[in-house]
């Protein structure tokens, strides 16, 4: 069985770490979790698969107390096969707790399924894709 991180070559991992650090500093957020997602994480990469990285972050408390709405996602263009996107912790928890799913949120929920399984029991067989600490 592969160990976490086996699917990401060291040079790609280094570049992902570098880009995540830049995003987090530029956005002024604190990373809570980063994980590999997509076909590589599920063990079914194709020759044209990119490296899908999803992360959950928290903003400073003042952002949550503001009367101005805050953006709850950080989206980056795919560059050199690296796809980085993150959700604010408030959004992520809301999606995980949501019980009445509609078709507009199915795609978002699908990416959170692995996180939900890992949150329940990190050692369970259904905790796939495995959390791959990129922090």
Image (spheres, rainbow, N blue to C red):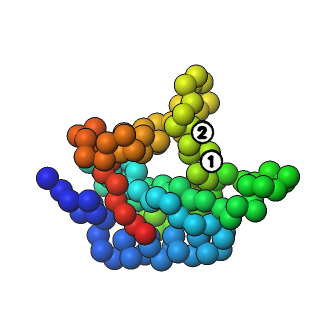
Q: Are marks 1 and 2 in contact (CB under 8 Å)?
A: yes
Tag 1's secondary structure? helix
32 w.r.t. 24: above or below: above
Q: Quadrant of the C terminus?
A: bottom left
Q: Which of 46 and 10 is in front in this view?
A: 10
Residue 70 place in picture, x, y as percent: 75, 54
Q: Residue 15's quadrant in the figure? A: bottom left
Q: Nearer the viewer, residue 27 or 6?
A: 27
Residue that mark 1 sits on = 90
Residue 60 place in picture, x, y as percent: 68, 65
Q: Residue 120's quadrant in the figure? A: top left
Residue that mark 2 sits on = 94
Q: Which residue reaches farthest right?
A: 67
Q: Which residue is drawn at 31% across and 42% down?
A: 121
Residue 31 place in picture, x, y as percent: 53, 64
Q: Which of 116 and 104 is in front in this view?
A: 116
Q: Is residue 55 visible?
A: yes
Q: Which residue is drawn at 53% across and 74% down?
A: 21
Q: How crowded is mark 2: few (under 14 residues within 10 Å), some or many (20 or more)?
A: few
Residue 17 place in picture, x, y as percent: 44, 73
Q: Can residue 78 be seen in this view?
A: no
* Left or right for 37, reference 5: right
Tag 2's secondary structure? helix
């Amino acid at each position: 069985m592969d160990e976490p991180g086996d699917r990401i070559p060291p040079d790609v991992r280094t570049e992902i770490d570098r880009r995540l650090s830049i995003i987090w500093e530029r956005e002024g957020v604190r990373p809570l979790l980063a994980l590999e997602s997509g076909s590589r994480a599920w063990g079914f990469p194709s020759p044209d698969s990119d490296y899908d990285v999803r992360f959950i972050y928290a903003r400073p408390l003042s952002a949550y107390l503001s009367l101005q709405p805050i953006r709850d996602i950080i989206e980056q263009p795919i560059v050199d096969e690296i796809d980085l996107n993150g959700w604010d912790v408030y959004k992520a928890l809301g999606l995980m707790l949501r019980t009445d799913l509609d078709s507009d949120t199915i795609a978002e929920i699908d990416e959170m399924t692995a996180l939900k399984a890992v949150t329940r029991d990190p050692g369970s067989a259904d905790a796939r894709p495995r959390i791959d600490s990129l922090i």
